[in-house]
Amino acid sequence: MNLSISLGGLQSFAQGLREAPAYTDQVLQETMTEATLLVQREWQENMPRVSGLTARSITSDVASTPAGVLGTVSSSQPNALFLELGTRPHMPPVAAIEPWVQAVLGIREPKEVKRVAFLVARKIAREGTPAQHPMARAVQSTEGQVAAMFDRAAAKVAAHLVGARK
């Protein structure tokens, strides 16, 4: 994600970390939490749904480290990566495709579910799966909001520093 923060904003954070480190760290953590939750929600909404398991696996976390305040948004499900980047041709387990056949294609008869799942698996074996980029779309659609959050945080730190000098 490319995040643009004005030079004045960066200077406010740098000065805040020197002059009011605890307050600045708190503001940065609050802002990062708000930003990561926004990206998490957007990624979850962009995620294709079958069972909802992958969307529910998406979490966010914020940590204050010596390197700075870090925010992560991630999924514990390996298929989140496959949805994001696509896959090369491979033969997937047919049983893993059966829930998708039922949920997406609406097929209910067990023999037909197995037959269609096998056909889908063969197609994946020939062509792979296309990249869908739900995370990239989430980052792109929230980029302006996240930048605005950090601009407001920089202004809050700057106002605190001015007030502390009085």
Image (cartoon, rainbow, N blue to C red):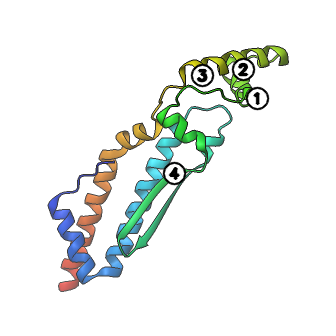
Sequence order check: which comes first, mark 3 or mark 4?
4
Alpha carbon separation for disc pair 4 and 2: 29 Å
**Quarter residue 123 falls in:** top right
Cβ atoms at labels 3 and 2 below 8 Å apart: no
Q: Callout 4, which amino acid?
A: Ser
- Mark 3 vs 1: CB contact within 8 A: no
How crowded is the residue under tag 2: few (<14 C-alpha within 10 Å), some, or many (20+)? many
Crowding around mark 3 (Cα neighbors within 10 Å: few <14, some 14 to 19, many 20+) is some
What is the C-alpha distance between the residues marked 3 and 4?
25 Å
The answer to which of marks 4 and 2 sits earlier in the sequence is 4
Residue 124's label in the rendered image is: 3
Residue at coordinates 35% horizontally, 40% vertically from top-left?
140
Residue 79, image quadrant: top right
Q: Where in the figure is residue 88, as x and y percent of width and height?
A: 52, 29
Residue receiving disc 2: 117
Q: Nearer the viewer, residue 76 or 159?
A: 76
Give yes or no for contact between labels 1 and 2 (Cβ–Cβ under 8 Å): yes
> Mark on residue 95?
1
Residue farthest to the right, as pictured:
110
**Of marks 3 and 4, the one in the foreground:** 3
Q: Amino acid at mark 2?
A: Ala
Q: Identify residue type, mark 3.
A: Ile
Mark 3 / mark 2, whichever is N-terminal = 2
Q: Position of residue 62 (x, y in %)?
A: 46, 64
Q: Which mark is residue 74?
A: 4
